[in-house]
Image (cartoon, coloured by chain):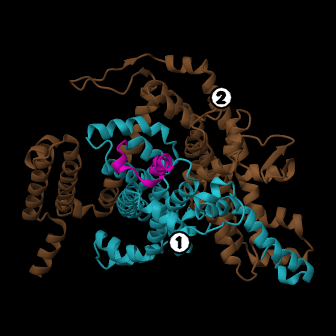
Chain colours: A cyan, B brown
Amino acid sequence: MFPSPIEKSSPKLQIAYKTALPLSLFIWLLPLLAIFMTSIRSSKDINTGNVFGIPTEFNFIENYTQVLTHPDALTFLLNTFVITIPTVIVSVGLACLTGYALAIYKFRWALPLFFVFVAGNFVPFQILMLPVIDLSNTLEIYNTVPGLVLFHAAFQTGFCTLFMRNFMKALPYDLIESARIEGVGEFRIFWHVVLPLVKPAIAALAVLIFTFIWNDFFWATVMIQDESSLPITVGVRSLNGEFVQQWQLISAASLLAAAPPVLMFFLMQKHFIAGLTLGAVK
Amino acid sequence: MASDASLQLNRTSSNVPLVAVSLLVALIAIGFMVNINVDNVMSTFELEKRSEARVPAFMFRISLLIIALVAGFIAIINTGLYKKNKIAFSPWIFLSIGLVFFSIYVIIPIFQSISYSFTRWDGLYDVNGVWTGEWIGFHNYIVLWDDPKFWTSLWNNVLWLILFMLAVPIGLGLALFLNQTVRGIRIYKSLFFFPFVISQVVVGLIFAWAYNPDFGLVAEAWGFFFCEQTVNIVGNVTTKCSIDPPSILGDEDYATYGIIAAGLWPQIAYCMILYLTGLNNVAHDQIEAARLDNAKGWNMLRFVILPQLKPATFIAVVVTVIGALRSFDMVATMTQGGPFGSTNVLAYYMFDQAVGEGVGRYGYGSAIATVLFAIMLVYISYFLFRMYQDEKEGR
């Protein structure tokens, strides 16, 4: 293990390390802590300039319910789920199919097509923006939730394919070969042999894509104009516009917008991290 | 014997009735799909607004498309031709939907955007659906060359690229700091990773607030060093500062650095987690062997650990470059390109020109996007090249 375990060093150093840990964490998360503290203050505190001192009263429940009971806030949150969940299902599902084709079959186009998915996954959004708006207009789904979902799902298929293909490539090939010799059809092999083996990859991808889409701001800004279809990342701005100068509500709304991916991360940490390393660091 | 032969025959010849039925189903589904449109959905369900009929119409169409696809695939896999060439045909069947979908929304738009960049167009079609733009060759690029805002954006992108790279060494440092086995370290690791999970919009809001010169974190820290509070007899507090707290986001010279610093926060967390995973996989025996040779500290890191962390470093650099070039959310939430366009980056400037309020310069915007794409292409090619080499070694 590197660096060498702290238990082997002098007691002084060990104490230093153990005090440095919480201290550095405090500094690291200071912006977040500060905004959290603001979100549970009363408006009186903020108006009298007590932004960093000890709050005179704790208004955690009051402030957060005030945000959540704002009619728009719930709509925004609900919209985000309606955008995020179908995207995850479609893109991960499609990537299982494409990943399988690119990993298991040895045909001439396997590598070039794989690279198409990889390259497409890295392009800047701006080069896609105008044609995608145009296409959505032609399909008459511009400014609707399905229009946004369709694009997200297509774009994320690139990343998911990259991930799935690499994961499936690492499966023992003999397994597929012996199934073929037994006379099992190609689709049955996919469904009964390969899919059960890639469950961890599916979980990792699902968590990751959920976070990506939840946190998306650009595409929602570009593809949706109606206030009633906006996700929370964009909606939080208009909420903030309504909570003029009520910083405790603005911070509570911002934190609420960030909450679901955070929960997801703490619940599925292992899968999340496996996904982030792009399968390159095993 | 006879049954054996028929079985053999069955395996390679078409199942004619099934193929016929599923083809018929597919054709009917496609026929309906083409005929359903927003207008007839609106009249059938007696909806008042055209916009209300768009989503249901689309849902009908996509369901029919799925039926047609499934029926089509059933037809294909029951033909003799497929049965004889299973291994050659199957990958294309598995690929088809994903590949077509990805091409329509990602690959083809790249080329469309590049072609838009040679036009003057405001994104509109006339009543007959005819394109209203005109071809103007390289004109947009010539205008771009003389546009000071473009150069500001490009320069800011360079700044982002350079300064964002700090996330890699800082992330490594943090990973080394946290790679211990003391109690509760796992919780520390996840909490350090925390900023990455938060959406960039929220990170932007948090930092915009922290930078606020009146009551933000920075102002507070500033006050600690440079300001003095006096309380007069009546009890009124007056604050006197030797130097006024800076308004980071309001100052042309500092705003971009302020945004980059905010962007570094989640990016460092990302690099840290990559390195932590990498450090987990460093070969133990090599470290022990190096220890026997008296290697420690910096030399150990430089000659034993870093070479083994190469894959992690590679991914960290790639995601950091892409993060730097994609910086949009932060700029949009923190300054919207201001003050006076000083924090524009190509990604934001393009958005602003193309769909920003009252501008609608599709052609010009596409030219900016093409430049950004060209820069990104350098990194994409490098990434693909490295991947290709790994593939060749692998098998």
Three-letter code for the amino acid on which mark 2 is drawn: Thr
In 3D space, how far apart are the residues under numbered discs 1 and 2 (Cα atoms)? 41 Å
Callout count: 2
Q: Quadrant of residue B275?
A: bottom right
In this view, B3 is above or below B390: below
Q: Which mark is residue A109?
A: none
Q: Chain of mark 2?
A: B
In this orientation, does residue B314 appear?
no
From the top left corner, tell me how far across and down residue B154 is, in percent. 64, 31
For the point 10% across and 64% down, the residue is B18
Per the rendered image, the range of residues in magenta is A225-243
Three-letter code for the amino acid on which mark 1 is drawn: His
Q: Is residue A237 inside the magenta stretch?
A: yes
Q: Disc 1 or disc 2, which is closer to the eye?
A: 2
Q: Chain of mark 1?
A: A
From the top left corner, tell me how far across and down residue B2 is, in percent. 9, 79
* Front-most of residues B276 and B183: B183
From the top left corner, tell me how far across and down residue B290 is, in percent. 86, 73
For the point 60% across and 20% down, the residue is B147
Q: Which mark is residue A271?
A: 1
**Is residue B80 toward the left or the right of residue A273 in the image?**
left
Main SS of the magenta part reads: helix
* Label 2 secondary element: helix
**Is residue B271 toward the left or the right of residue A123 in the image?**
right
* Residue placed under numbered mark 2 in the picture: B152
For the point 50% across and 27% down, the residue is B367
Q: Residues within 10 Å of mark 1 (few under 14, many from 20)?
A: some
Q: Quadrant of residue B249?
A: top right
